Structure formats: C-alpha cells, structure tokens
Image: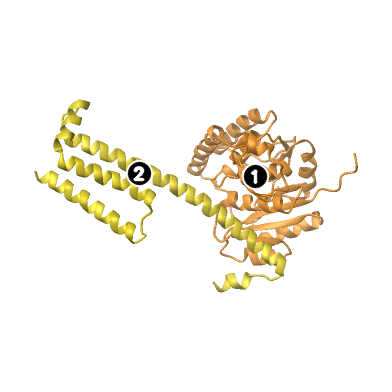
Chain colours: A orange, B yellow
C-alpha cells in the first residue's frame, strides 16, 4: 500500500451568541493544530460572533436564523462533504472541549467511523452528574452501548469526530430536534452501518453560560432523553441506500431515491 | 327546520368562500378539495336530514346530533393532523434552505474575498 497522505481535517464549531468565547476557541484550535481548517457555523447570532470569528481567521458560515445545533452541524457536514474533507470534528464554541485532544480523536478513526470524546471513560474521569440527569445519561449509555457493541457511556457529548462515511450520513441526515443532534445522530450512524468508539477526554467548565442544574430541568431532560431515544430507535431511516452510497465526492444529497431511478446527473 | 336551514346556509357560505379564495389564488387546490367535500357533505345532510337519522340508528346511537358532532370533531382532528404534517415538512425544507443559504454565502465570500458582514450589520 502507498503511504497515505495526512488526513484533511475540518473542525466544525457551532456557535450561537458566543462572541465572548469563540475567538479563544478558534485561537486554541489553530495553535494546537495548525494544519486543521476551522469552520464556525454562526447559528443566527445576534451578537458579534460571526465578525469576531472571521477576524480570528476562521471560515464562517452564517445561517440566516437560528436552527439549533443540529442544523448548524448538518450545514458543517455538508461543507465537509463538498470540500472533500477526510475528517470532520465538532468542537463547541463555549470552551468546554479541549482542542489538544483533536489528534487523539482523529487517530481513533482508524478503526471506527465515529469517535466520541467521553467524559466518563478512562480511569481518571472526574466528571460527575447527579439525579435525573445522571439516570438519563446512564440509560442512554446502556442502550447505545448495546446497539454499538462497545461502551458508549457519554451519548450527549458534542465532542466527536466523523470519517468520510459518517460525514456522508450526517450531511444527509442530521436531526434538528433537541438531543437529536447528539443521541439520535448516534443511532442514525449505527443504523446506517457506521461503527462507533469512544476515547476518554477531560472537559472544562464552560467559559461562558451555565448548564441547567435545577431538579425540574433535570427531570425534563430525562423525559426528553427518553423520548428522543425511543423515537430514534423506532424511526425508519433509508439505511441500505445511505450505507451503500459512495460517500465524499457526491454534492447531491438525494440519497433516498428508490433503486433504479435516475437523477439525470453524470 | 331551523337547524337544517342553518346547516345549509353554512355549507353554501363555505362553498362560496372556497370559490372566491380559489379565484383569488389564496387557496391551493389540494387544500380546497377536502373543504369542498366537507361542504358537500353538509349540504347533503341539510337537504336530507333523514340520512343522519338512518346512520344514527345503524350505529346504535340515540341522538343524531351526537353523531354529527362526533364526525365533525374527527374530521377537524384529521385536518389539524394534516396541517401539523405539512408544517413539519415546511420546517424541514426551510431548515435545508437556511443551511444552503449559509453555505452559499460562505462560498461567495471565499470566491470574491469580500465580507458581507457590513451588509448584515446594516440590516
């Protein structure tokens, strides 16, 4: 086999009103990983997120209005697919995700299509949650681990890398609903034949904004997690078509056509 | 038979409204069809009230008005459900368009080297 050239990696940063942390995030990615392209998806921000991200040297895709993380990420995956990237990595703009883990995530793609940076993996995992939020995470972890035939105990982690195959799947099908962007996307990846593995990461406290911690919010979170997971499991996906589609070159994303039907493109 | 006259008047009003909305391009045929059928059914029931009584006996109900209300609520439920479905479909299309607009703006900026930030700020 000829030596493989280094993978072209795109970091996708979904950002909604993150003007206070987006520049630091971009700078950190660029200093720790100079060869990586950074694409900020400005998800309809009302502040100066887009301007500051562009000034910091990132590619900036401005969505006309807020779509949520799922919409921002699908736009990012479509960009990655059209520009022929080998790897797309999601890094949140709030400073939670440490870019020094990027090489670890990308390297783990050698034997998986999707790599999740897990807060609960590894011997020195210090991240803990309590109450209904913890039950939700345990439940999600158990079900997804069973589906994936490997331990996936941090299903809601947004710190993840996707290879060409997974980019193709996510460019066509990336859920927009709350928790769909994390939980359901993993189910879609599995059902379309992608393999998943996790690597331990440490996440930092957010530099801006706060995680919801009240018991009522946690209970609602549990409820929505169960709903999202159940829906993801019973929904139909065009599994065979998407899995067999040549992934990476195709600009056209109409993968749901019935077999034998021509789309009139060369 | 005041109730029958009322029903007939409502049905005719719906039919006239439908025609007027279609004529002014305010309603698409696919939505007009279901309303046309509903108005037609209302006309039939208003003109032949015996039909409602016959159907009530057939189903073992005691009051014809109960059957009328039941059918009406089921029809409205189905219509609302269909609208929710259409809404979801439109939202998905809007989302796809929004993503494409964002990506196209990025491509234009990359091709021309011009930043459209000022345009956005002026908006």
Query: Can see residue B45?
Result: yes
Residue placed at 80% from the left, 54% from the top? A32
Q: Dividing the picture into quarters, in which one does residue A66 lie?
A: bottom right
Q: Which residue is mark 2?
A: B79
Query: Can see residue A92?
Result: no
Q: Which residue is mark 1?
A: A170
Real-space CA distance between mark 2 and mark 1, rounded to the nearest whole angstrom: 33 Å
Asked whether, in this view, residue B22 is left or right of residue A75, the answer is left
Asked whether, in this view, residue A187 is left or right of residue B66, the answer is right
Q: Is residue A258 above or below residue A90?
A: above
Residue A227 placement (x, y as % from top left): 50, 37
Q: Tell me the mark number nearer the camera, choosing from 2 and 1.
A: 2
- SS of the residue under disc 2: helix
Asked whether, in this view, residue A251 is left or right of residue B3, the answer is right
Q: Is residue A31 above or below residue B116?
A: above
Asked if the residues shown at circle 2 and circle 1 are in contact, with their CB atoms under 8 angstroms apart, the answer is no
Asked whether, in this view, residue B42 is left or right of residue A102, the answer is left
Residue A1 placement (x, y as % from top left): 90, 39
Q: Is residue A244 above or below residue A19?
A: above
Residue placed at 60% from the left, 39% from the top? A183
Do callouts 2 and 1 point to residues on the same chain? no
């Amino acid at each position: 086999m000829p030596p493989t050239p280094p993978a072209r990696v795109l970091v996708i940063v979904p950002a909604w009103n993150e003007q206070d942390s987006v520049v630091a995030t971009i700078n950190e990615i660029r200093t720790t990983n100079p060869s990586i392209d950074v694409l900020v998806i400005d998800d309809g921000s009302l502040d100066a997120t887009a301007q500051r991200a562009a000034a910091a040297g990132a590619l900036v895709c401005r969505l006309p209005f807020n779509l949520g993380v799922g919409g921002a990420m699908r736009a990012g995956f479509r960009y990655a697919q059209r520009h022929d990237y080998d790897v797309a990595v999601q890094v949140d703009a709030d400073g939670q995700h440490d870019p020094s883990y990027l090489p670890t995530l990308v390297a783990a793609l050698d034997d998986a299509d999707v790599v999740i940076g897990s807060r609960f993996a590894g011997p020195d995992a210090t991240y803990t949650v309590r109450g209904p939020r913890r039950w939700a995470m345990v439940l999600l972890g158990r079900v997804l681990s069973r589906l994936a035939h490997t331990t996936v105990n941090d299903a809601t982690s947004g710190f993840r890398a996707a290879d060409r195959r997974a980019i193709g799947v996510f460019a066509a099908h990336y859920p927009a609903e709350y928790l769909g962007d994390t939980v359901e996307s993993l189910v879609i990846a599995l059902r379309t034949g992608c393999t998943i593995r996790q690597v331990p990461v440490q996440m930092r406290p957010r530099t801006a904004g706060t995680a919801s911690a009240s018991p009522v919010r946690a209970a609602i979170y549990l409820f929505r997690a169960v709903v999202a997971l159940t829906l993801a499991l019973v929904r139909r996906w065009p599994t065979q078509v998407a899995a067999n589609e040549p992934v990476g070159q195709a600009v056209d994303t109409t993968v749901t056509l019935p077999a034998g039907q021509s789309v009139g493109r060369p | 038979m005041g109730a029958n006259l009322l029903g007939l008047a409502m049905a005719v009003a719906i039919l006239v409204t439908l025609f007027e909305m279609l004529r002014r391009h305010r309603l698409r045929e696919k939505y007009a069809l279901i309303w046309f059928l509903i108005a037609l059914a209302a006309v039939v029931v208003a003109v032949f009230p015996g039909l409602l009584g016959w159907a009530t006996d057939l189903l073992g109900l005691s009051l014809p008005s109960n059957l009328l209300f039941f059918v009406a609520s089921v029809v409205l439920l189905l219509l609302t459900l269909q609208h929710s479905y259409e809404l979801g479909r439109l939202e998905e299309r809007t989302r796809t368009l929004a993503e494409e607009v964002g990506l196209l703006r990025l491509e234009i900026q990359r091709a021309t080297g011009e930043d459209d930030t000022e345009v956005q700020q002026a908006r």
